[in-house]
Image (spheres, grey):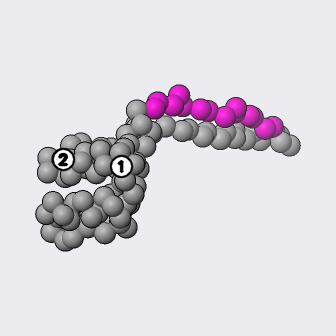
Amino acid sequence: GYSNHLCFNVSVRFNNLISEQNPNGISEEQSQKLEFILSLKEKGLGYRRIAKVLNERGITTHKGSVWGGNYVYAVLKRYKERLERIEFRKMKYEPQFSKMWIEFTK
């Protein structure tokens, strides 16, 4: 007789399972430092110049260290990545299902 195989392949793409680990993101102090760094960047200062300004004003990193250009770069990079993650989370995908097929074999 015939044996029938029901074969189906389901592929789903969605992102609502990505949770917001830290909804507030950063502390008020970190937020103020970030805003200051962003304002200096908007004025056209490079990473080393920004580090120099922060150090001259006695503003330390969150670990209490002095700033370096590479650290300013890392902070801005993480900020940009965070914005991208937030944007990605806001996007909603419709589930996408592939077509099903049925095979009849002898």
Magenta segment: 91-104
The amino acid sitting under disc 1 is: Lys
Q: Which mark's residue is nearer the viewer, 2 or 1?
A: 1
| Residue 27 visible, this angle | no
Q: Is residue 71 above or below residue 76?
A: below
Q: Is residue 75 above or below residue 92?
A: below
Q: Are marks 2 and 1 in contact (CB under 8 Å)?
A: no
Q: Is residue 33 above or below residue 15?
A: below
What residue sits right under mark 2 in the picture? 32
Q: Which of the labelled discs sits on residue 69, or is there none?
A: none
Residue at the (77%, 41%) spot, across then down: 3
Residue at the (51%, 31%) spot, across then down: 93
| Residue 106 rendering spot, x and y as whole percentages | 86, 43
Name which quarter of the figure residue 39 lies in. top left
Q: Nearer the viewer, residue 50 or 81?
A: 50
Element marked by disc 2: helix
The residue most toward the bottom is 65
| Residue 37 rendering spot, x and y as whole percentages | 28, 51
Residue at the (39%, 49%) spot, across then down: 44
Is residue 47 found inside the magenta-colored segment of the image? no
Q: Nearer the viewer, residue 7 or 43?
A: 43
What residue sits right under mark 1 in the picture? 41
| Residue 63 rendering spot, x and y as whole percentages | 17, 68
Q: Nearer the viewer, residue 49 or 84?
A: 49
Q: Main secondary structure of the magenta part?
A: loop
The amino acid sitting under disc 2 is: Gln
